[in-house]
Image: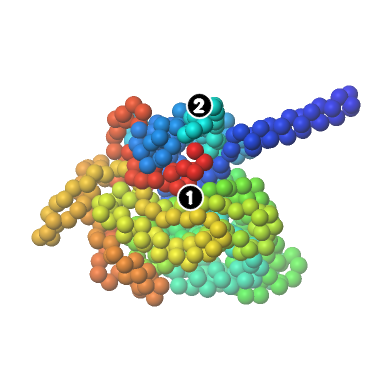
């Protein structure tokens, strides 16, 4: 029995070896990471991308499609058995069903495999048969990338950093108040630890709702099945807490912070992040503009922190687990561009590019190809030219999310020069000087999908061409 099970193990091993050899030789797998801060548009992006790759009538800028080389694209069981499957069918039904609505918030990581069957191109077309490329799409919260910065920070550094930021934020008043009554040298009381963690989490949620991007530790907002566990039951404490004696609240909080790093942050980078080949970073730049200069500056800083993860050498831990592997392409996409008339899309792309400037330069330096663009994964509006304050303006029209009524919308003209927005944001202005940038929430429009065409979008085909065009 023992012998047979050993033999079985050996042959199974051989099987996996030949499988992966076959796969590597004949069926390339591209792992496409899709990330962005909360509500950036990840779920809608993936749903529309997959739907438009399956039915490619609206993908003229995807070269392989224009050349008639994509025979079919179909969903397959994903390779990772322990990662939840991306709920494609459910999300597509939400967006394109008889009562169209936006999909629910997502709680964590998920994955989907789309396989494309390709006809051979050019001279070899008569000789070579069809080939298959697998696209594994991985959806994960951008907040988890922000956690990378924690790996270099001791508990004392982290507390110092966070508490300094909190001083200036009205969302933190409640937590800072709770902190005042705490003695970190007192013996650990689980009730006190839980109450502080709750109060800190409430601050994080309020900060996110107010448009702030730096809402870490990332898992506090999306705890999943870790909710209430010790790794998520810590909070920043005033100076000196980490050095408090054994069995005290301070010491235990420092220990839990370290456990969060070791048992939550590192496994994510090791098991998921390290395997990504191409990356989309979605940015709700319009949403930040609407919230004002502080939100824009905060988005800029958070993007720099997020993109640090794509910079080799940024973290000793990452360098070790990546072992020389690099993300080959990174697309920075400003989402929800259907809120703007197309003649303002270049300005939105320029703002996105400027927002990511520092981080992007470093990623370029690392050899990754990068591009910034403005897109809408699901177009909910049409364009019109209408009178407004005595002149004609280019606006968009759609169905309002709250009232269900049709309305025209002019968000304000974005400046040609992004510095006009980013400079006041950096200088800590509290309001835009010349105007406000309104944001409206449009509902997905009821659709009649043409056979062979996916949901309407803006520039999703260009995004796909940049991300995977070279392997098709
Ligand atoms: N008009 C328009 N709105 C969009 C588009 N994509 C996303 N939105 C809006 O942004 C919201 C968030 O989109 P999601 O795709 O759920 O964002 P997410 O990044 O998956 O959000 P979480 O899972 O909560 O982190 C949606 O509910 C829509 O209101 C788009 O292409 N056009
Ligand atoms: Mg989502």
Which x, y percent locates residue 280?
48, 50
- Residue located at (62% from left, 47% from top): 275
Q: Is residue 174 above or below residue 92?
A: below
Is label 2 in a helix, a strand or a loop?
Answer: helix
- Residue located at (44% from left, 43% from top): 464
Which x, y percent locates residue 105?
45, 45
Which residue position is annotated with label 1? 280
Numbered badge on residue 66: none
Corner quadrant of residue 343: bottom left
Corner quadrant of residue 12: top right
Q: Is residue 244 above or below residue 85?
A: below
- Residue 62 lies left or right of residue 4; in this view the side is left
Numbered badge on residue 126: 2
Is label 1 in a helix, a strand or a loop?
Answer: strand
Q: Are marks 2 and 1 in contact (CB under 8 Å)?
A: no
- Pick whichever of labels 2 and 1 is earlier in the sequence: 2
Is any atom of residue 444 visible in this view? yes
- Residue 31 lies left or right of residue 394; in this view the side is right
- Residue located at (45% from left, 62% from top): 356
Q: Nearer the viewer, residue 308 or 20?
A: 20
Q: Is residue 413 above or below residue 75?
A: below
**The N terminus appears in which quarter of the rendering?**
top right
Q: Nearer the viewer, residue 70 or 93?
A: 70
Which x, y percent locates residue 185?
69, 71
Number of callouts in the render? 2
Q: Nearer the viewer, residue 430 or 35?
A: 35
Q: How many angstroms separate mark 2 from mark 1 (CA)? A: 35 Å
Is any atom of residue 171 visible in this view? no
Number of other residues with Cα within 10 Å of mark 2, as a class: few under 14, some 14 to 19, many 20 or more: few
């Amino acid at each position: 029995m023992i012998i047979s099970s050993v033999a079985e193990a050996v042959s199974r091993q051989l099987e996996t070896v030949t499988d992966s050899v076959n796969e590597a030789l004949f069926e390339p797998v591209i792992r496409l990471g899709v990330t962005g801060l909360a509500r950036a548009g990840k779920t809608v992006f993936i749903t529309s991308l997959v739907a438009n790759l399956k039915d490619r009538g609206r993908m003229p800028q995807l070269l392989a499609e224009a050349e008639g080389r994509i025979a079919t694209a179909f969903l397959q069981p994903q390779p990772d058995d322990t990662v939840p499957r991306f709920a494609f069918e459910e999300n597509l039904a939400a967006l394109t069903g008889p009562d169209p609505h936006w999909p629910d918030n997502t709680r964590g990581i998920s994955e989907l495999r789309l396989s494309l069957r390709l006809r051979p191109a050019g001279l070899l077309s008569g000789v070579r048969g069809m080939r298959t490329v697998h696209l594994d799409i991985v959806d994960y919260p951008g907040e988890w990338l922000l956690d990378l910065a924690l790996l270099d920070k001791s508990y004392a550094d982290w507390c110092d950093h966070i508490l300094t930021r909190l001083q200036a934020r009205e969302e933190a008043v409640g937590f800072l108040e709770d902190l005042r009554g705490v003695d970190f040298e007192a013996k650990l009381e689980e009730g006190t630890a839980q109450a502080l963690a709750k109060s800190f989490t409430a601050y994080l949620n309020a900060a996110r709702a107010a448009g702030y991007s730096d809402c870490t530790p990332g898992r506090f907002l999306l705890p999943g099945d870790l909710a209430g566990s010790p790794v998520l039951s810590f909070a920043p404490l005033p100076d000196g807490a980490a050095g408090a004696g054994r069995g005290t609240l301070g010491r235990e909080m420092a220990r839990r912070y370290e456990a969060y790093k070791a048992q939550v942050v590192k496994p994510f980078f090791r098991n998921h992040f390290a395997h990504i080949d191409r990356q989309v970073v979605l940015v709700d730049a319009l949403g930040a503009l609407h919230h004002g200069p502080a939100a824009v500056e905060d988005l800029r800083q958070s993007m720099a922190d997020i993109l640090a993860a794509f910079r080799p050498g940024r973290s000793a831990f990452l360098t070790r687990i990546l072992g020389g592997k690099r993300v080959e392409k990174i697309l920075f996409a400003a989402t929800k561009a259907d809120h703007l008339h197309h003649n303002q899309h270049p300005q939105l792309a320029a703002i996105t590019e400027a927002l990511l400037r520092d981080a992007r330069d470093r990623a370029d330096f690392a050899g990754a190809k990068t591009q910034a663009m403005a897109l809408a994964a699901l177009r909910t509006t049409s364009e019109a030219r209408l009178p407004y304050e005595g002149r004609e303006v280019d606006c968009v029209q759609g169905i309002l999310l709250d009232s269900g009524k049709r309305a025209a919308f002019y968000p304000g003209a974005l400046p040609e020069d992004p510095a006009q927005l980013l400079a006041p944001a950096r200088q800590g202005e509290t309001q835009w000087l010349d105007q406000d940038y309104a944001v409206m929430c449009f509902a997905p429009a009821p659709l009649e999908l043409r056979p062979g065409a996916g949901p309407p979008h803006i520039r999703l085909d260009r995004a796909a061409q940049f991300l995977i065009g070279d392997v098709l």
